[in-house]
Amino acid sequence: MSDKRQDYISWDEYFMGVAMLSALRSKDPNTQVGACIVSPENKILSMGYNGFPFGCSDDEYPWCREGEPLKNKYFYSAHSELNAILNYRGGSLENCKMYVTLFPCNECAKAIIQSGIKEVVYACDKYAAEDNVIASKKMMASAGVKFTEYKPTGRSIALTV
């Protein structure tokens, strides 16, 4: 008979925790989003967070949300989901699962579908009524990508040095 520990975290807690930790790398002052891609065997394949592409200085590009298109962040920043997909160098992402802290937009949904990811677990859907998220859900449903809301357990995890 085993005396193994019983209060270990679930796979969902583990991978959403990695996505949440990844979000903390974002330098965006308004919205920090993280993503974690996992193989069918529960191996972490890639992670990403929202920010500017390599070589584009965080100090030279705008972080604001309003204003002229060339003077706000939207033309320049890459979302966490796209970064996680592009960061993966191991081959195919077919049948993988993505954990993301914010429901993917329509542009990220296209990348998720095209990459072969088959499930998205999301922590927050605060833009559910926005057209881009409605379109995202419609495309993912059509393409057979399952999306489910992460159910927090209420467990608190703290990192200390």
Image (cartoon, rainbow, N blue to C red):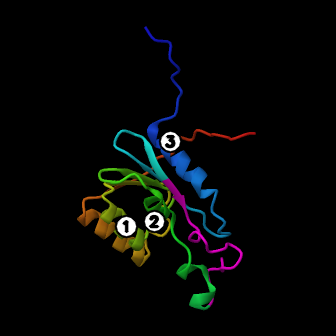
16 up-or-down from 126: above or below: above
Magenta-colored span: 47-67
Q: Which residue is mark 1?
A: 111
Q: Residue at x 61, y 72 (%)?
A: 55
Q: Residue at x 58, y 54 (%)?
A: 22
Q: Which residue is mark 3?
A: 13
Q: What amino acid type is highlighted by mark number 2?
A: Leu
Q: Quick one: label 2, few (<14), some, or many (20+) residues within 10 Å? A: many
Q: Report the residue that reaches farthest toward the right.
A: 161
Of residues 139 and 151, which is closer to you in this image?
139
The picture places residue 92, in percent across and down from the top left corner, at: 33, 54
The picture places residue 70, in percent across and down from the top left corner, at: 59, 89
Q: Check residue 5 in the rendering and tell me which mark sits there, or answer none.
A: none
- Whether residue 35 is visible, yes or no, is no
Q: Residue at x 34, y 67 (%)?
A: 137
Q: In what quadrant of the picture does the C terminus appear?
A: top right
